[in-house]
Image (tube, rainbow, N blue to C red):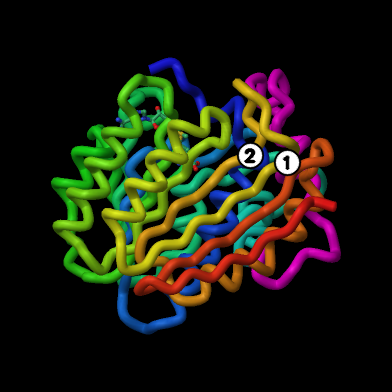
């Protein structure tokens, strides 16, 4: 396992994923009933943007730094911006970037719960430090795909699974599709959010088609590209959400035109939100302009 998310923390892919995650969590909180979250590939939870990895890659300059502390952000982006702001309580330049576990932790209420899986020992130790003592959260040294089989359905019966693999091993898309099939069998009403790169389109594009069959009743796809597609380059990223929480599509359609404008690296990028429910399909899309 060579992948280290610290090189990529706060880049345009994280902004899409974490903005969508924050909206989904806010929607889950709109009901009083407790919810559960499973984060299958959690990472270290908190990233120091002044640290060596982030300085070396500089990827956050094309991502979160372009939208943090801007006064014109749409309302639907506020849960995400608040989660980022909460990690930087002393103001000033943005230094600490929250990974998905911290964003989830900040959304949990007293009776909600979360499980985080992380296989890399050093990342997991850091995750433990970032989360601290929190009776609502359990951290596991466990394969995230296997956790989908082991931990679902949660006793709360409502909530979300985030699947955010590093895509560094062959066969990742097949494992993703299998995990989704297993997850849906165990928890047909759960929301499953899967992140993937727009890079090698045969990979995630083919997975998204498989996902449409697996989650056939209700599925959302969201895409944010910061430039034209180019072979071998990460020009954007994409989310597939099975059983999306009510309001997620509308929230994304509010955020993505703004994000696509702010994060554009070259002409030719754009955004898209596509929701399919019981055979009906609604598409919102636009070019970065
Ligand atoms: C893309 S990063 C996660 C980023 C995190 N979800 C976030 O948004 O902040 C993927 C993480 O998964 C871990 N990992 C790789 N394979 C795994 C597996 N099979 N099960 C659990 N964790 C795994 C890696 O060590 C890495 O920290």
Q: Does label 1 point to a residue whose CB lies under 8 Å from ligand 1?
A: no
Residue 130 vs residue 195, the one in the foreground: 195
Residue 146 vs residue 275, the one in the foreground: 275
Q: Is residue 44 left or right of residue 286?
A: left
Image quadrant of ligand 1 equals top left
For residue 105, the mark is none
| Region in magenta | 49-78
Up/down of 172 relative to 116, above or below: above
Which x, y percent locates residue 66? Answer: 80, 46
Q: Does label 2 point to a residue whose CB lies under 8 Å from ligand 1?
A: no
Residue at x-position 31% and y-position 28%: 119
The residue where tag 1 is placed is 226
Q: Is residue 105 left or right of residue 64?
A: left
Residue at x-position 57% and y-position 30%: 199
As helix, strand or loop, the secondary structure at mark 1 comes to loop
Up/down of 198 relative to 287, above or below: above
- State which quadrant residue 255 falls in: bottom right
Residue 96 visible at all: no
As helix, strand or loop, the secondary structure at mark 2 comes to strand
Residue 19 vs residue 257, the one in the foreground: 257
Residue at x-position 20% and y-position 62%: 187
Could you tell me if the residues under marks 2 and 1 are in contact, i.e. CB atoms within 8 Å? yes
Number of residues whose C-alpha sits closer than 10 Å to that of mark 2, classed few (under 14), some (14–19) or many (20 or more):
many
Q: Which quadrant of the figure contains the N terminus? A: top left
Up/down of 71 relative to 198, above or below: below
The residue where tag 2 is placed is 236
- In the rendered image, residue 94 lying in the magenta stretch gets the answer no
Residue at x-position 38% and y-position 50%: 162
Which x, y percent locates residue 260? Answer: 74, 51
Number of residues whose C-alpha sits closer than 10 Å to that of mark 1, classed few (under 14), some (14–19) or many (20 or more):
many
Which x, y percent locates residue 160? Answer: 35, 60
Q: Is residue 65 left or right of residue 78?
A: right
């Amino acid at each position: 396992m060579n992948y280290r998310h610290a090189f990529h923390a706060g880049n345009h892919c994280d902004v899409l994923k974490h903005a969508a995650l924050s909206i989904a969590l806010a929607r889950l909180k709109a009901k009083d009933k407790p919810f559960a979250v499973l984060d299958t590939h959690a990472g270290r939870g908190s990233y120091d943007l002044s640290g060596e990895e982030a300085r070396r890659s500089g990827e956050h300059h094309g991502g979160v730094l372009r939208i943090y502390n801007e006064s014109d952000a749409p309302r639907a982006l506020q849960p995400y911006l608040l989660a980022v702001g909460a990690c930087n309580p002393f103001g000033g330049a943005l230094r600490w970037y929250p990974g998905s576990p911290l964003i989830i932790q900040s959304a949990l209420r007293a009776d909600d719960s979360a499980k985080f899986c992380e296989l890399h020992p050093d990342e997991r130790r850091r995750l433990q430090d970032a989360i601290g003592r929190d009776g609502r959260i359990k951290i596991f040294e466990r394969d995230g795909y296997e956790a989908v089989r082991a931990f679902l359905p949660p006793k709360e019966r409502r909530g979300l699974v985030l699947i955010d693999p590093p895509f560094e091993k062959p066969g990742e898309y097949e494992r993703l599709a299998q995990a989704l099939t297993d997850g849906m069998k165990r928890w047909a009403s759960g929301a499953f959010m899967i992140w993937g790169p727009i890079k090698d389109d045969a990979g995630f594009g083919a997975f998204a088609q498989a996902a449409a069959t697996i989650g056939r009743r209700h599925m959302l796809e969201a895409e944010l590209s910061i430039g034209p597609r180019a072979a071998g380059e990460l020009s954007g990223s994409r989310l597939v959400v099975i059983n999306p929480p009510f309001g997620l599509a509308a929230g994304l359609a509010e955020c993505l035109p703004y994000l696509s404008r702010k994060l554009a690296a070259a002409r030719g990028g754009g955004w898209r939100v596509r929701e399919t429910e019981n055979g009906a399909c609604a598409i919102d899309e636009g070019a970065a302009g």
